[in-house]
Image: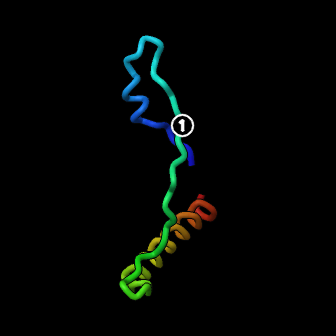
Amino acid sequence: MQKLDMAMYAATQDNPGGPVYMMIEDDTPQVAPYTDDAGKVTRGGAIGYLIAYALIFGVIAYFIFGI
């Protein structure tokens, strides 16, 4: 994912010709459930994901059927 290089922009924002806009490639980390030292998913992490998926499903169902 590309994003604006804010360090370059901040360093050049007072230039008479204007700031330098430079896009850099951002290495986005993958989303993964919490694991313990043995690599197993923790019970709290699994419950958290279950609650999050239930909330997402509920919101989508509300917008489909409620509106």
Q: Mark 1, residues whose alpha carbon is within 10 Å: few (<14), some, or many (≥20)?
A: few
Q: Position of residue 55 (x, y in %)?
A: 48, 69
Rendered residue at 50%/56% (across/down)? 28
Rendered residue at 46%/71% (across/down)? 52
Q: Position of residue 9 (x, y in %)?
A: 43, 29
- In this view, the residue in front, 65 or 17, is 17
How are the colours assigned in the image?
rainbow
- The residue lying furthest to the top in this view is 16
Q: Position of residue 38 (x, y in %)?
A: 40, 88
Disc 1 residue type (three-letter): Met
Work out whether 20 lies above or below 3: above
Work out whether 27 lies above or below 25: below
Q: Position of residue 25 (x, y in %)?
A: 54, 46
- The residue lying furthest to the right in this view is 64
Residue 2, quarter of the rendered image? top right
Rendered residue at 51%/28% (across/down)? 21
> Element type at marker 1?
strand
**Quarter of the picture holding the C terminus:** bottom right
- In this view, the residue in front, 31 or 66, is 31
Rendered residue at 40%/23% (across/down)? 12
Residue identified by numbered label 1: 23
Work out whether 12 lies above or below 34: above
Judge left or right: residue 27 versus residue 42: right
